[in-house]
Amino acid sequence: MNLPAPRNTTPALGPSPVAAGDAQLSLEEARAAILRALPSALAAAGLAGHAGQPGAEDVPLLSALGRVLAQDILSPIDVPSHDNSAMDGYAFDGNALAAGQPLALQAAGTVFAGPPFAGSVGPGQCLRIMTGAVMPAGLDTVVPLELCRVEGDLALGTVHVAPGQLQPGENRRLRGEDLACGKPALRAGRVLRPADLGLVASLGLGTVPVRPRLRVAVFSTGDELRSLGQPLDPGCVYDSNRYALMAALQRLGMDVLDLGVVRDDPAALQATLEAAIAGADAVLTSGGVSAGDADHTRALLARLGEVAFWKVAMRPGRPFAFGPVQAAGRSSWLFALPGNPVAALVSFYALVRDGLLQLAGARHEALPVLQARCVDGVRKRPGRTELQRGRLTRAADGHWQVQVAGSQGAGILSSMTQANALIVVAHDQGSVPAGGLVDVWPFDGLV
């Protein structure tokens, strides 16, 4: 196993969020406990790194997509840099509208986007102007082409404006209206999106200060697991969890350390976990956290850290372990997920995703939630959160609707591929009749 040298030092460890044991938590209680326990880079002063990592690194603009902004970007210019026209039309002095009478303005030329108009405009005159063109001195209002009538040539004819069509100053973008020089254009902690990169480019900046990528070590546990390329012995299955979880991490812009499959052996588990702690800020495992698992798992984690074993009132899912772990003077954060393929991936979205983003220095943004009509209905008793695979579509009336996608067994990964969303039936909610409203997490919102 070849791990890169660690870049961070030991993070400060806080108290375990809940006492270790068999207490059952609601999904929301578990989510809140994780976020309270994890350090937040946004709480650190200046560019102090998350989990002790160094601060910002400047990367080229086109390499910054999906990275976490390390510091506020202050605009070096006013945007727009001059008053300009918001649309194609005719620019004139808005004082002419004060009388409330029809206007007849003489066009005196055309101004295009680019260099300012070099001439002058006298009383009763106007200029044909294009969207984005600098507003000439003394002109502050633009009448759109569709709200005026032109006699003769568009650039030199007579422009008629009926009363009541617009107010003085309309259709003009003011200098600095979008961004004022010296003011924040983007705030630290933002996960950069395409529009953000366009905004940075509009400021003339070619690089962006971003946080180092969070490093997450991933491994699966179980004697029954086989890696790709190995023969599939009787009673064994190929390890799918690792690949699904690593893909989910890559979509979050994180560096992944693949530590493979670890057999159910205390020495092998300890060696792998110590290697993960040495090279990663967080450790993500699947399998080995349910009540029936060997005692050596809990004993090992008790020696290495303050890991709490929880029963989370959710389906699929339920067994989950979380907490700080330490080895050889370094620390990391362990997230141990259930072994069933769907349960592992759903637990990642519901319990791990937001915590890892917080460790990465990202500003918290709640998952987007839609309300949709449930086509099939869902049978459920209050007391746990149900997260079912669903297919979200638009109904003929334009409203969102969601249909249960395939078998809902915790090991049926094919139904996860048929789905494009999770149907979320809340902890205290009972059965949902066909046509009833449910909350939905679109998969594209989980990036």
Image: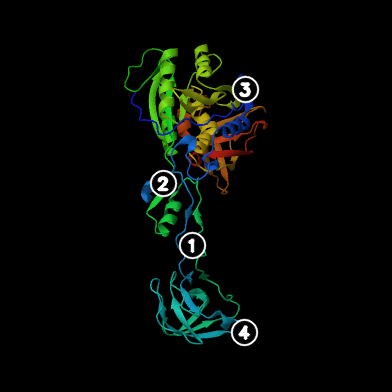
Q: Which mark is residue 65?
A: 2
Q: Which of the two discs, 4 and 2, labels the residue nearer the N terminus?
A: 2
Quarter-of-image position of residue 253: top left
Q: Are marks 1 and 4 in contact (CB under 8 Å)?
A: no
As measured in the structure, the alpha-carbon distance from the residue carrying label 1 to the one carrying label 4 is 37 Å
Asked if residue 237 shows in the view, the reply is no
Mark 2, mark 1: which one is toward the viewer? 1
Badge 2 marks a residue whose secondary structure is loop
Where's residue 416, x and y in %? 48, 31
SS type, badge 4: loop
Image coordinates of residue 150 in percent, x first then y, are 47, 82
Q: What residue would you read off at disc 4? A: 99
Q: Which mark is residue 19?
A: 3
**Depth-wise, is mark 1 or mark 4 nearer the camera?**
1
Whether residue 145 is visible, yes or no, is yes
- Separation of disc 2 and disc 1 at Cα? 24 Å
| Amino acid carrying mark 3 in the image | Ala
Say whether marks 2 and 1 touch (CB < 8 Å): no
User: In the rendered structure, which disc, 2 or 1, sits on the residue that comes first in sequence?
Assistant: 2
What residue is disc 1 on?
181
Instruction: Specify the color scheme.
Output: rainbow
| Disc 2 residue type (three-letter) | Leu
CA gap, disc 3 and disc 2: 39 Å
Q: Amino acid at mark 1?
A: Cys
